[in-house]
Image: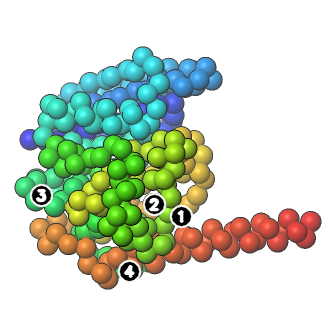
Amino acid sequence: MITPIILFVYNRPLHTKLVIDALLKNELANRTSLIIYSDGPKRESHVKAVRNVRGIIHTIKGFSNIEIVERGKNFGLADSIISGIDEVLNKYDQTIVLEDDLIASPFFLQYMNDALKLYSDKEKVASIHGYSYPVQRQMPDTFFLKGADCWGWGTWKRAWKTFERNPLVLLSQLAKNNRIKQFDYDGTVNNYKMLRKQAAGKIDSWAIRWHASCFLQNMFTLYPGKSLIKNIGNDQTGTHTQATNDYDVDIANECINLVEIKVEEKQEILNIVEGYFKSIKMNYLQKLIFLLKNKFNR
């Protein structure tokens, strides 16, 4: 079976067109079902852009089947994605999930389908991920990290059942099991803080809850050594993004060598990823110091 794709779109017509065009360059596209969820406008100023996006998705051709779900109201990013995945996994055993700012390599669908098949019966594998961080070290063809991720990924019905939607439950378990530092990649990211913001209603993130759910279940996500996804949404056009080039990658122009590996998080790989996160934090601090110095001098 060729895994169906869920694509979530909102109010970015140019981004949406680029995402579709990239997917169609995959050999498996014409054998793949595409299910598109178009969220309703949150405010009056978004109505035109949402209408433009819907105009684009109704002209799509090149997939084996296309199903479009137009929300009559605004669900918001988190509820739209969670409910959409729930609906699709009620019909299928597995799915691939994309958002309207994720450009796929021509080899993305082959990798995702092969990996989803390869690890389908491995209970400790939560998901398959298409994006890989732009670290400055040579990475293996594929590797595992604990938890889950959200930029071009696939999962199974069996894994999605572990998703805990209540952030208070997740916060309690992280604290009770003394796993906050590990959850924050040894303090190099602010995952726990983000989860607290979710619990306080300050943000609306499905991804941090999905990651925490899998992390607490000691489940793992498979990553490619070379990224098969490029995020073009870090340009301040997204709902929860800020402009940055810290995550820019050159997407793979060849197939990923996919063989089954042991389901474990290797310390040397974790060290590389934590080093990358640490470099981002340092870059941010350096930029902040530079801005503050300039402001003081002025």
In 3D space, how far apart are the residues under numbered discs 2 and 4 (Cα atoms)?
19 Å
- Residue at 71% x, 67% y is 288
Q: Which residue lies under the disc numbered 1?
A: 246
Give the answer, above or below, for where 143 lies relative to 19: below
In 3D space, how far apart are the residues under numbered discs 1 and 3 (Cα atoms)?
33 Å
Q: Which mark is residue 192?
A: 2
Figure quadrant of the N terminus: top left
Q: Is residue 14 visible?
A: yes
Q: Which residue lies under the disc numbered 3?
A: 123
Left or right: 24 as drawn, with respect to 175: left
Left or right: 293 as drawn, with respect to 183: right
Q: Nearer the viewer, mark 3 or mark 4?
A: 3
Q: Are dots 4 and 1 in contact, CB under 8 Å?
A: no
Secondary element at image label 1: loop
- Residue at 40% x, 21% y is 71
Left or right: 243 as drawn, with respect to 28: right
In the image, 241 versus 18, the foreground residue is 241
Amino acid type at image mark 1:
Asp
Q: Are dots 2 and 1 in contact, CB under 8 Å?
A: no
In 3D space, how far apart are the residues under numbered discs 3 and 4 (Cα atoms)?
25 Å
In 3D space, how far apart are the residues under numbered discs 4 and 1 (Cα atoms)?
18 Å
Give the answer, above or below, for where 266 lies relative to 1: below
In the image, 186 versus 177, the foreground residue is 177
Label 3 crowd (10 A; few <14 / some 14-19 / many >=20): few
Q: Is residue 56 visible?
A: no
Query: Could you say which quadrant of the image residue 57 lies in?
Result: top left
Q: Which residue lies under the disc numbered 4?
A: 271
Amino acid type at image mark 3:
Glu
Q: Nearer the viewer, mark 1 or mark 3?
A: 3
In 3D space, how far apart are the residues under numbered discs 3 and 2 (Cα atoms)?
25 Å
